[in-house]
Amino acid sequence: MRTIYLLGSLNCDLTIRAPYLPEAGETLKGGDFLMTPGGKGANQAYAAANLGGHVKMAGAVGKDAFGDLLLESLSSVGADLCCVRRILRNTGVAMITVIDGDNRIILDEGANAEVGRADVDALLGEAQAGDLFVVQLENPLPVVLYALESARARGLTTIFNPAPATAEAAPAVAFSDIITPNRKELKLLSGEEDVEAGCRRLLQMGAGNVLVTLGKRGSLLYTSHERQEIACVDVGEAVDTTAAGDTYCGALAVRLAEGADLMRAARFASLASGITVTRRGAQISIPDRKEAEDAARRLHLTI
């Protein structure tokens, strides 16, 4: 199996369920509070490691209890954290409100803002051509661009998850062998309302393959020579979409690292994310490989 190198954010998620989004000045009673390890980078690293991948991650956390929680969680699934630094700045925090299974998130980036080029160089120092590189947008954009360019120069397959969405990240598209936007992110990067027009635009901007996640509609693989729809996998009632997209990216990287083609990897990613949405929380909701394989057998899926 090839190694999955991942640069990304580490946040502590503070989640509360609410009946609706409060208005200005309103105090609303919620419930089911959770404090869990999260962050797009950490979630994707956790998903990839928990699903059987060999994962090495770079990032930064504070010297605080939130940082302890994140490192313990990732270590528990075997992720290599030698390139995750501990610094004198608070660990990133995400305030998540869940309403009818969908989430609204406010971030304090904290230590994630201190990740720099030296972290990229340390992470990729032993990377080999053919390995995979995964990155998102919760670290400084210039560092993300440098990381994608460096990984591409070393011959790694680059997977760019453009989240949270920002139009300023458009230059990163050209360094993406695989880009995994949701519909909103696709629109911001491409300027197109129509999904397929947006996919075509990302290919024109230099992306190798576009894999758009569409929630209950599944996902769409769009390349210069094919268009394939991947169905959403219904494993049970959706209760919380937190980490669903991150699970998708981590699972996708694992199957690609194992040698699967992109279509088969996307089916596995759809299954894994389908399991994630059936329970609350970020990393605590992500399935392991046995659970994913058991679900595939139960649903008669080939993964």
Image (spheres, helix red, strand yellow):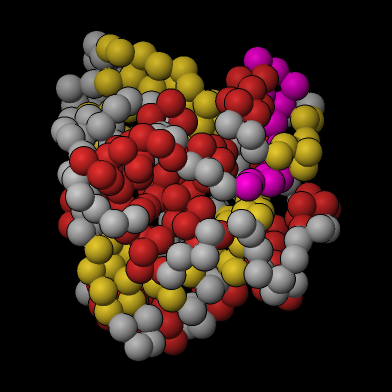
Left/right placement of residue 178 relative to residue 146 reads left
Q: Taking the image as drawn, is residue 96 in sight?
A: no
Instruction: Answer whether residue 61 is magenta in the image.
Output: yes
Near-viewer residue (71 or 144): 71
Quarter of the image that includes the C terminus: bottom left
Q: Residue 45: x percent and y percent?
A: 57, 43
Q: Residue 132: x percent and y percent?
A: 61, 62
Is 70 located above or below residue 40 in the figure? above
Residue appearing at x 21%, y 41% in the figure: 298
Is 233 located above or below residue 280 in the figure? below
Dividing the picture into quadrants, the one containing residue 11 is: top right
Instruction: Answer whether residue 109 is magenta in the image.
Output: no
Give the magenta range. 54-67
Quarter of the image that includes the N terminus: bottom right
Left/right placement of residue 193 relative to residue 122 reads left
Residue appearing at x 57%, y 47% in the figure: 53
